[in-house]
Image (cartoon, rainbow, N blue to C red):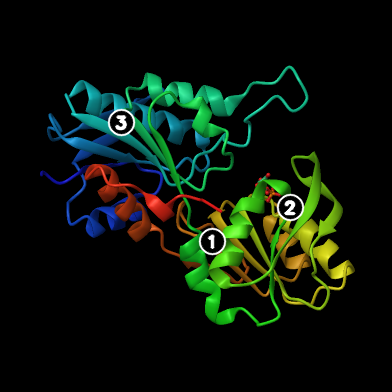
């Protein structure tokens, strides 16, 4: 069997190169440039005809440009005659817009799935997508995998015995339950309501948190308001100080630094699904290359992803 061909987008080149190194294959040579008017132009510089191609491109800021680049690279591989093209998103933006929350809105997650399919991808692979609804938006085979075991390994030496794993909102309950099982800890969750892009309020806490150190788990840290509000509510409910935050995607959009600092997290762990964002926070990075390479290899060899997927 020939090796998988990895095409690296430019959004997180170091990660793509580490995945390629894990696969013991050099990334496919390609050129990504902009025309003078700002239009993106991509070109594969070697043939992928008949190959099983994996286009690796997360979509951090600027999400539109990174997403378009992913689509163009898939299109270029398909037009060159690749046998199969898989769009690999270590982080997939727009997944939070998976329904019309207020009405008269675009369901951007569905539109994004449609565009991935229109680009000619035969399959999609996403690391800790925000929404499980994505699965239903794709007509092509779609797989998601989780970084929970990776984050659990990274944090386990720092977890006090009295800790409790907490989902800071209902969307994170499955991820937190998986983390609690991995760390052999009890789980709790916070019921949050989002009042705006940067403001959330906590309605109630379910589970025993009194005197316990909270390990907060979420798919992403954007402005940090979700984690900060949860940490505040947990402190008010009598949780022990020195909470730890675990999230797959460290977006750290403004004002994440001040939100997280005010919440006095002892440690913050994220993966390198997107390029590390400099903050003055005690952020530790767990590398996701091995995990993504293993998923690519299993898809390439038509093996099940098994417990790489998020099951609880
Ligand atoms: C929302 O439901 C997500 O799972 C995250 O909790 C949220 O997007 C994080 O955003 P922020 O850090 O801005 O609160």
Q: Is residue 126 left or right of residue 259?
A: left
Q: Is residue 10 left or right of residue 189?
A: left
Residue plotted at (79% across, 63% down): 207
Please give the label number shown on residue 226: 2
Q: Quadrant of residue 39?
A: top left
Q: Which residue is mark 1?
A: 270
CB-based contact (under 8 Å), mark 3 and mark 2: no
Mark 3 or mark 2, whichever is nearer to me? 2
Q: Position of residue 7 (x, y in %)?
A: 26, 40
Identify the residue at horizontal 38%, vertical 41% (top origin): 57
Q: Is residue 303 above or below residue 286?
A: above
Question: x%, y% of residue 26?
Answer: 18, 51
Residue at (74, 40) in percent of width and height: 197
Viewer-side residue, 289 vs 190: 190
The answer, for residue 239, to whether it is visible in the render is yes
Label 3 – label 2 distance at C-alpha: 34 Å
Nearer mark to the viewer, of 1 and 3 = 1
What secondary structure is marked by label 3?
helix
Kindly identify which numbered label has been placed on residue 60. Answer: none
Tell me if the residue at label 2 has its CB under 8 Å from ligand 1.
yes
**Residue with the mark numbered 3:** 73
Closer to the chain start, of discs 3 and 2, is 3
Q: Residues within 10 Å of mark 1 (few under 14, many from 20)?
A: many
Between discs 1 and 3, the one toward the N terminus: 3
Q: Quadrant of the C terminus?
A: bottom right
Residue closer to the observer: 248 or 44:
248
């Amino acid at each position: 069997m020939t090796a998988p061909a990895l095409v690296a987008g430019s959004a997180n080149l170091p990660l793509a190169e580490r995945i390629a190194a894990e696969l013991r294959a050099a990334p496919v040579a390609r050129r990504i440039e902009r025309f003078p008017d700002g239009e993106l132009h991509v070109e594969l510089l070697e043939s992928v005809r008949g190959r099983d191609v994996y286009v690796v491109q997360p979509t951090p800021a600027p999400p539109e440009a990174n997403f378009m680049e992913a689509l163009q690279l898939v299109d270029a591989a398909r037009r060159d005659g690749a046998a199969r093209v898989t769009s690999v998103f270590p982080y997939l933006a727009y997944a939070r817009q998976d329904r019309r929350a207020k009405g008269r809105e675009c369901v951007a997650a569905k539109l994004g799935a449609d565009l991935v399919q229109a680009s000619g991808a035969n399959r999609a692979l996403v690391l800790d997508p925000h929404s499980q609804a994505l699965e239903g938006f794709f007509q092509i085979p779609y797989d998601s995998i989780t970084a929970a075991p990776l984050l659990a390994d990274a944090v386990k030496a720092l977890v006090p015995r009295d800790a409790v794993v907490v989902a800071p909102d209902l969307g994170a309950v499955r991820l937190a339950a998986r983390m609690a099982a991995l760390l052999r800890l009890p789980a709790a969750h916070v019921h949050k309501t989002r009042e705006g892009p940067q403001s959330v309020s906590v309605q109630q806490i379910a589970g025993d948190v009194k005197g316990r150190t909270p390990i907060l788990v979420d798919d992403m840290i954007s402005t940090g308001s979700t984690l900060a509000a949860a940490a505040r509510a947990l402190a008010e409910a009598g949780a022990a100080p020195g909470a730890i935050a675990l999230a797959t995607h460290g977006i750290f959009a403004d004002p994440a630094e001040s939100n997280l600092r005010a919440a006095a997290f002892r440690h913050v762990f994220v993966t390198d699904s997107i390029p590390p964002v400099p903050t003055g926070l005690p952020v530790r990075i767990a590398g996701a290359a091995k995990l993504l390479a293993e998923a690519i290899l299993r898809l390439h060899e038509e093996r099940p992803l098994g417990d790489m997927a998020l099951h609880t």
